[in-house]
Amino acid sequence: MTSRTGRHFLQIPGPTNVPDQVLRAMSAPTIDHRGPEFAVLTTELLASLKPVFGTSGPVVVFPGSGTGAWEAALVNTLSTGDRVLHVETGHFATLWQQMAVGLGLYVDFLPGDWRHGASPEAVAERLAADTARTIKAVCVVHNETSTGVTSRVPEIRQAMDATGHPALLLVDTISSLGSIDYRHDEWGVDVTVAGSQKGLMLPPGLGFNAVSAKALAASRTARLRRSYWDWQPIIEANRRGFFPYTPATNLLYGLAEALRMLRAEGLPAVFARHDRHAAATRAAVHGWGLEVLCADDREYSSSLTAVLMPEGQDADKVREIILERFDMSLGAGLGRLAGRIFRIGHLGHLNDLTLAGTLAGVQMGLQLAGVRIDPGGLTAALDVLRAE
Amino acid sequence: MTSRTGRHFLQIPGPTNVPDQVLRAMSAPTIDHRGPEFAVLTTELLASLKPVFGTSGPVVVFPGSGTGAWEAALVNTLSTGDRVLHVETGHFATLWQQMAVGLGLYVDFLPGDWRHGASPEAVAERLAADTARTIKAVCVVHNETSTGVTSRVPEIRQAMDATGHPALLLVDTISSLGSIDYRHDEWGVDVTVAGSQKGLMLPPGLGFNAVSAKALAASRTARLRRSYWDWQPIIEANRRGFFPYTPATNLLYGLAEALRMLRAEGLPAVFARHDRHAAATRAAVHGWGLEVLCADDREYSSSLTAVLMPEGQDADKVREIILERFDMSLGAGLGRLAGRIFRIGHLGHLNDLTLAGTLAGVQMGLQLAGVRIDPGGLTAALDVLRAE
Amino acid sequence: MTSRTGRHFLQIPGPTNVPDQVLRAMSAPTIDHRGPEFAVLTTELLASLKPVFGTSGPVVVFPGSGTGAWEAALVNTLSTGDRVLHVETGHFATLWQQMAVGLGLYVDFLPGDWRHGASPEAVAERLAADTARTIKAVCVVHNETSTGVTSRVPEIRQAMDATGHPALLLVDTISSLGSIDYRHDEWGVDVTVAGSQKGLMLPPGLGFNAVSAKALAASRTARLRRSYWDWQPIIEANRRGFFPYTPATNLLYGLAEALRMLRAEGLPAVFARHDRHAAATRAAVHGWGLEVLCADDREYSSSLTAVLMPEGQDADKVREIILERFDMSLGAGLGRLAGRIFRIGHLGHLNDLTLAGTLAGVQMGLQLAGVRIDPGGLTAALDVLRAE
Amino acid sequence: MTSRTGRHFLQIPGPTNVPDQVLRAMSAPTIDHRGPEFAVLTTELLASLKPVFGTSGPVVVFPGSGTGAWEAALVNTLSTGDRVLHVETGHFATLWQQMAVGLGLYVDFLPGDWRHGASPEAVAERLAADTARTIKAVCVVHNETSTGVTSRVPEIRQAMDATGHPALLLVDTISSLGSIDYRHDEWGVDVTVAGSQKGLMLPPGLGFNAVSAKALAASRTARLRRSYWDWQPIIEANRRGFFPYTPATNLLYGLAEALRMLRAEGLPAVFARHDRHAAATRAAVHGWGLEVLCADDREYSSSLTAVLMPEGQDADKVREIILERFDMSLGAGLGRLAGRIFRIGHLGHLNDLTLAGTLAGVQMGLQLAGVRIDPGGLTAALDVLRAE
């Protein structure tokens, strides 16, 4: 088969295609993490991270995955028995909520249909009803990686503010940061959770928390046991350019290079590019006569698109054919969506022709799987890409 | 513009996309070229090269470009004032012929229209007419990189043999070796000229000569001055795994890896893949309503396709738009074809989806340049790719 | 200054010099962590890790640092309010003990002078006195990175066994694994804690726990809150070659290569090499007329040597001169040893001549700092290296 | 054995240790050598090369080895039957002279003892005697890589000028450029020959000619056949940032990085560093009680030192032991010096501690081979390195 020549198409919604220059940067020799050269690296890195989160406050970097950064957000701000409000936007929101339960929190889980983002109205209603102010935090996934739905965080914040409720707002941006417009400070988010392997164009292995002053204050009284994930010693050591324990040096090299690339392109251009690629992808899906999972066009994700299979068709079969024949990885349906959708990642280090190749592969794979589609889908996508 | 995110599409007919693993292999530390480890490397390399050329004889590797390997083929086998027959298949055949003239040879240049390969009949006719046997060598470009036309070398050899003429057959395989079926021994070629940067999937910097026993014998009496390009000391030193002067060590690392990849895929599969990608590309060109430059369907090149522009359209304008908007490099028309054609390289480390992205980019670029085409071209190409 | 040409001498006791081939392996493109290729990688990796730990049981790999692996060892096996016995061998033993306190455990901290390893007798005495069996675990640092002292773990286990006490034995091998003989199963260790950046010759970013059947059983009833560090879902997912959350893919690539290198050399040869380099280093220290911090010659570390400064001399000044003049990083004295010692790392990817260069740099640095030493130290080290 | 852990010591006088960052630069994807990005690369490179040669004139870059650059120097400036004066400084001067003979030149070969540089007086004497001005060029090896002797080029030029003879001065700087002070323009050199793999810190694969106006004028009438090595089309194409045939793109990437490093250090600092390392090496040799091959202290090479073995000792045996036991490559005695000397390269990307490790390895190897030496040699070298 031709499957193993040329470059693999990694079109899952993360890890994304790591740019060559980031991989090369990561392959520089490891240096002393307590020496002066390292302090310069850290100081520059931490400063460069802030604009990507849209914050002037601290960004804490952990050796760990995004899952670790979820845990960090909870254990730094909450105490055993606290109530938190999670919103069920999909598989990852469900996992985060399960983690909260496991850590000893009381979780209200606002139910969802996995085709919509978090409802600002529903959040507000719950908070308004919480007259005793027992809810300490609202946890929302900005861009639900399992569904391709982007919640309207600013509206959620406004709705929360309108109730006068003091709950913290914790937001998972694992598959949106560096891809979809996001503004920690301006939107009034208290903890932003992120990972390295999506819009930041790195391999997995780093987790991030951007932290508001209010969250930092909360961390001083929060009582969930924490050690590795504790913000305080990290923020303290970061002041001099160091970390309290050994950081993932070579991933930090890659991060420095990835941030340089994002700066060079400019965040507005980065976001516009993702919007454009998402629009082209939806044009293809619609052109094929298929349905995008996201049911609200205000909530289309710009970093991935989940495609709903026609009744009776197995999405995993399509993915398998595409992997086997065209050496492209797509995202599977997760949890309750298993077999019913597949997900096309169009985030990170991507350009028009790679997207065109991606959509060509999806189109051929659908046809080979016997799914009845209109082959005009790809052409429709090209119309979007060609239009500037 | 989106032009500089994601991976550049290098779809010129060489240098081709160097696989990541080859680039990594090349970045290993340089070793002592006179030490025992190097001898092992060379010995294995030289053995692995033979099947790629289809020869059991020596393959000489030069630090240098394919142009150097042209020169080596001439200076090792010929003497000042010798007559040679070159066949005008295109720009590169013309350059090689100019080199021969510059080196002091008398050159008969069989004229051609740059849309056909070397005619076996015409070659035979010239040789038959040379009753004095003054022609010492016939020089043919197997795959004319400037036109996308592949000459029928076995038929040329047969035609030569039929005349009983003793001329050597020197063949340039720079853009065919490792991409298009080629058999040095079986086809009776005397010197095969190749370079590293096409089907061998390396950066430029190595030139090759496969040498028949007859060519080797000729080299003992040939009198053109030679030093750097002299086969004898290289073949001699190669016996113990060394070179008479410092070889391009890190390119040899890459070569070892590239040969390993070709072995893993298997040469028949490599050739079938190139044939298939060429067929898909021609399906696109015909689908767009455009003309392939190659005028004889026995001579379609499997490594590149030259596309003839409609009257009054500037091919370079199309290439410029494609580079600017879609970050893809295509080959320009060279010499008399400047502005009239562009060339799509589909050789080396390539797969279906990268080809699909390539053809999508060409289609959009043609449209943006105002060339009237049928957008069904891409779909026609996918039909070929999907058909297995 | 000449300080920034040539290769930096990273002679801290970790992170160690990452071999070129490991860095290159890490720079391969990130793949889908849910695809079949990844499952093969994980399965092979996990099998290859076992002999390095000397275990036939599971080895859990975390994206995170060694500090995280400390936490994992505690939270998987213990419950809030459990008593644990830590042994004060130095700075890192102290930090681990502080972590245990912070996680809500009652810690008995056996005092030490930072020049000796954990005393088997003292441990046994404490356990024997614990007739109520309230101590649930004994925590020992195998090789104290802050002092260069290696505790005699088998003797500790024997002493524990002699008391009949059921406490678990948790051992930190962060700076010994892959450098100093270690046998999880044979020595009866319950949890072995390790990191990637020392004997495993990787950049930092991976933590490890090797887990005995007894520890695994304990994890089923242990009640410390855990999520990210929870062994169970990882061991479960590992069965099919996957991880419950995104693993640090590119570090795993490097790990595969590093394990291949350890296998190629053979663990006994690896340990003998470290022993020999340590002996040469001590020969230098003694030859200079200086004192090795480790006070018991049964406990000399083979991965690092801490050198005690003569009264009135500042170790950090020596390190600063060496960094500035000779571009070599050495380890600082930590905690109560700050300024009084410096530490020479001689572990990981190291050979005789790099060690010779290292000791030459230390010798020159001591002289430049005005420390009165006998310059025969280096020659004494070479006598060891030359002796086979 | 410990021989294969850690980094190989490549202490031959070239290829030298290629810096990590140069290897990484070389592993960037190959780009279109006819595109705008390439033109920028070439233009910057060619400008950056000039100061390294000390010239404001053109520097021609060939895909090829230094041997090719020798040939280029001859074939561009001379005609069949021209007389040239070569000076026998050692093995490489002998090879260059043989090449000249092979290319059809009449060669006067000024005899030498392989322990001295080219004698300005002897050159002047030959030119003065050539009243018919039949000698067209004087060919001198600046730094004889086979002996570690550096000829005094400015004095040779002065001596030539004093005779009023119009011969061109062609100088081989293969193992001096970028290591030892050299000034093409100021010293009145007509063609400077260089290669990539020594002071330029690259792998082998590039050859260079710096060309004076007088040499360029000579090239217009010189009649030796040339094609690949012809300066004219290269200089012409270089004006727009291109090459007439495919250049060795990835080596050019490395060259750009290496030139950046030389600029950052500053050429005077680069030369001082080499002088200092050479002085330390000679201190070791003299300290061991051995003899440096170079017999004139005005001509000591700063890039390598050849060590003369005591009567009856086999230098190759010493090298073999050192390679086997300490994984270090040293240069062999070449030609008439085979077995009588070994050569220590101390050029390129090197620092004090790597040199110390190198000399430690030589010392141990000599001892293991049974050569009677004073072990104070290494200490004497450290005295030089420490002195600054």
Image (cartoon, coloured by chain):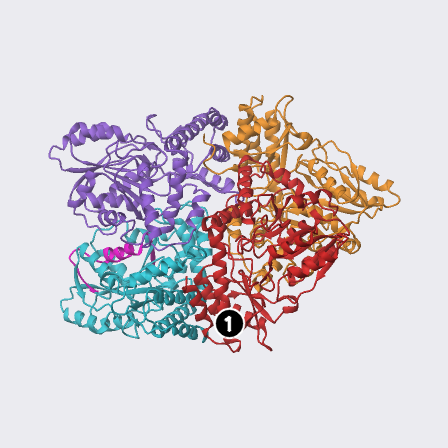
Chain colours: A cyan, B red, C purple, D orange
Looking at the rendered structure, the kind of residue marked 1 is: His
Q: Is B63 displayed left or right of C348 in the figure?
A: right
In the image, residue D135 sits, relative to residue A9, either above or below, namely above
Q: Is C370 displayed left or right of C63 in the figure?
A: right
Q: Is residue A30 in sight in this rendering?
A: no
Q: Nearer the viewer, residue C147 or D199?
A: D199
Query: Residue B166 magenta-drawn?
Result: no
Give residue B116's quadrant in the image.
bottom right
Q: Nearer the viewer, residue B307 or D51?
A: B307
Q: Is A133 displayed left or right of A192 in the figure?
A: left
- The residue beneath circle 1 is B286
Give residue D15's quadrant in the image.
top right
| SS label for mark 1 | helix
Rendered location of residue A360, percent (x, y): 40, 67
In the image, residue D360 sits, relative to residue D230, either above or below, namely above
Which residue appears at 57% of the width and 27% of the height?
Answer: D318
Rendered location of residue B59, percent (x, y): 60, 45
Rendered location of residue A290, percent (x, y): 31, 72
Task: Please state the extent of the stretch shown in magenta in the rendering.
Answer: A58-86
Q: Residue under mark 1: which chain is it in?
A: B
Q: Nearer the viewer, residue D186 or D337?
A: D337
Return the residue found at the far left. Answer: C132
